[in-house]
Amino acid sequence: MPAISRSLSRVAGPVMGLAGVVVLFAVLRPETFLSVYNLQTIAAQTVIVGLGAIGMTFVIVSGGIDLSAGSAIALSSVVTALALREGAAPSAAMAGGAAAGLALGILNGVLITRLRLAPFIVTLGTMGMARGFAKYLAEEQKIDAPAAWLTAIMAKSPSPEWLLVAPGTWAMAIVAAMMAFVLGRTVFGIHTYAIGSSEATARLCGVRVPRTKIIIYALAGFFAGLAGVMQFARITVGDPTTAIGKELDIIAAVVIGGTSLSGGTGGIGGSLVGAFFMSVLANGCTLTGVPNYVQEIVIGAIIVAAVAIDRLRQPLEAGS
């Protein structure tokens, strides 16, 4: 019960914060913010960061970090566009884009475990490598490709109308529920928490740490690859310069959602709340005419506050 109550308390804060910004912008711009189209827009805008946050949650819970997520999104969008331009079926192009992200994730995991390097250093390096490779494949220009039915995945006004929000949003929610089960109810999930709490203790308990870490980073890469496919579906071009800095948005969503950067605690549900929080904040600031630089300052301050609160919470949880 104490563990369940701690988990609920970590999610309660982000939920209250999300509710707060929704109420704020609903009061400031009721006609536009609360319109059906705008709410559909927010739901669609959350998909890319939300998918990235699902994989990033596993990484941060394990005590790691992945700075290559934004570059993985760009690489995946380019691979998807190239496949479509060469005549591949949309489903095959989607698989290719996701595979590109998966390959990058596996590379991250192998380098971190085999060379015993810090995740920050490895993923900082692969961030540049993946971005450069995306520019090479695209010949440093955007790739136009026939998107076919892929555009419908991220349509703000979905068809059929009873879906209410973009199919990509429903896909994100379903996948999030599945991965929440994996993280909270499977041996792999338990091992992920164990590594984040104490890698040395996890080794002593028989956890195969290198293999588990490789799978964790492979998952993060795969979900970043899926986010890249959704990015292509949204803008219908493969752009090697897209998603610059998106890894910071993804990490911010996870941290705001209550996952500790120290590892060992967190969950998928909170990360999705964090992703929606950021989408609502960005959307509301745009509607109210708040400059982009103010948005960046506010988001940065929120991240610092979230980390500070986590630091203050840890001794209390340890004592209980």
Image (tube, rainbow, N blue to C red):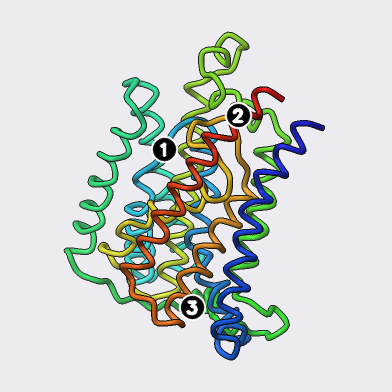
| Local SS, label 3 | helix
| Residue found at x 41% / y 61% | 298
Q: Nearer the viewer, residue 303 or 61?
A: 303
Which label was assigned to residue 266? none
Q: Amino acid at mark 3?
A: Thr
Question: Badge 1 is on which residue?
Answer: 65
Question: Which part of the image, by quadrant, shows the N terminus?
Answer: top right
Looking at numbered disc 1 in the image, what kind of residue is underneath it? Ile
Measured in 3D between alpha carbons, the distance from the residue under mark 1 to the one under mark 2, in whole angstroms, is 14 Å
Instruction: Select label 2 or label 3 by which is in front.
Output: 2
Give the Cα separation between the discs numbered 2 and 3.
Answer: 37 Å
Q: CA distance from mark 1 to mark 3?
A: 31 Å
Residue drawn at x 17%, y 64% is: 140
Residue at 55%, 34% in the rendered image: 312
Q: Residue beneath label 3, please?
A: 151
Residue at coordinates 50% horizontally, 74% vertically from top-left? 150
At mark 2, the secondary structure is helix
Instruction: List x then y, in percent, for residue 2.
Output: 78, 31
Q: Earlier in the sequence, mark 1 or mark 2?
A: 1
